[in-house]
Amino acid sequence: MRALSRRRGGFDVWPGFVDALTSLIMVLVFLLLIFAVGQAVLSDTLSLKTRALEAVNAQVAELARALSLNEGELRAQTARAAGLTESLRQATEERDRLRASAEGAAGRETTLNADVVALTELKHQLEVEIARLLAESETGKQELGRQTEANAAATAQIELLSRQAATLREQLGELAQALELANRDVKAKEGTIADLGQQLNLALANKVGKLERYRSEFFGRLREALGSRGDVRVVGDRFVVPTDILFGSGSAELDEAAQGGLAQLAATLRQLSDKIPGDIDWVLRIDGHTDRAPIHNERFPSNWELSTARAVAIVKYLASEGIPPERLAANGFGEFQPIDNGLSLAAYARNRRIELQLTNR
């Protein structure tokens, strides 16, 4: 009894362990039950989804089949519409053709009716004309007698006209012979004129050749008078002198040194003019040229006035030195006939020039 009492008085854990184990088993059983219920619900849900998906697939297949049928029917309707359109077009063309035929038939009927009316009127006119001709035939018989007499007179008149025509033909023949002689005379005169033209050209060529010889001598003496400058040169039939050795910038007044050179030029020209034959009508032409630099003042509104004034100054000076004025000519060209199209100072200097030309008038 004491021993039992001692065991009871001590701490006994077994009942608590059993209770805890029981509670754990109950929780596990509860969880398994919930899992089983969830599995059942999930299985039902999946089954429902599967059946719904199958139903949707069936509807899709049905719609695809219906769509295929509709496409086939649409193609058939399209082909049928095309056939109906072609039939309509052919029917329209046939209608237009029949309408044109009907209009043509109506027009032909109208034309035939008009022709019948015109023929009827023509028949009436012919009947009237036949009656008039029958009436005139009697009158014509009477007129025939008078015409016979008139024919005799006309025959005599014709014979007279024939004789006059023969006379005119003879006169025309004589005029043709005279014309032929005149043409021969004209051709001979034309040949003479051609010969005279050739002789004149030869004479002119001889005079030009003579003047060319005097021009060469004049240029040679002129070069000696102006000195051996590189910018004084002969270009073709012209003697080119820079204006810088004759005039100041923008001026038409001859420098004193330039006057000395021009005095020698005048003396040379006087000596040369004594050698030139009197039948050569020569003239010394002075041409003034400027550069592109513009000028605008009271005396020279433009380079035309400046170039002309320089040429005139040289002409006046030569005339004062005894050169006959009728042997001198002055021209101004401004900047519009450059020999160098450049824009450099050297190009401008080359374009500022006086050109002397000994030429025929």
Image (cartoon, helix red, strand yellow):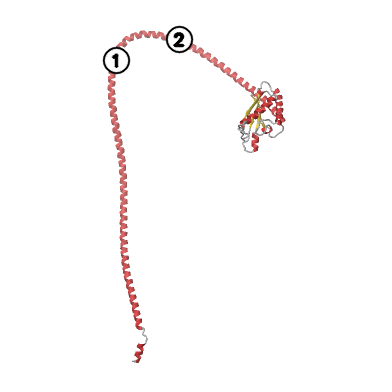
Q: Position of residue 168 (x, y in %)?
A: 47, 11
Q: Could you say which quadrant of the image residue 269 lies in?
A: top right
Q: Nearer the viewer, mark 1 or mark 2?
A: 1
Q: Does dot 2 land on a helix, a strand or a loop?
A: helix
| Residue 132 image label | 1
Identified by mark 1, the residue type is Arg
Disc 1 crowd, CA 10 A, few/some/many (<14, 14-19, 20+): few
Quadrant containing the C terminus in the rendered view = top right
In this rendering, the count of numbered labels is 2
| Residue 295 image label | none
In the rendered view, does 229 fall on the left or right side of 38?
right
Residue that appears at 39% across and 8% down? 153
Q: Position of residue 332 (x, y in %)?
A: 62, 29
Identified by mark 2, the residue type is Gln
Q: Are marks 1 and 2 in contact (CB under 8 Å)?
A: no
In the rendered view, does 25 fall on the left or right side of 222?
left
Asked if one can make out residue 206 in the rendered structure from this viewpoint, the answer is no
**Sequence order check: which comes first, mark 1 or mark 2?**
1
Residue that appears at 31% across and 53% down? 67
Q: Position of residue 104 (x, y in %)?
A: 30, 31
Disc 2 crowd, CA 10 A, few/some/many (<14, 14-19, 20+): few
* Farthest bottom residue in view: 2
Residue at which label 2 appears = 164
In the rendered view, does 15 fall on the left or right side of 206?
left
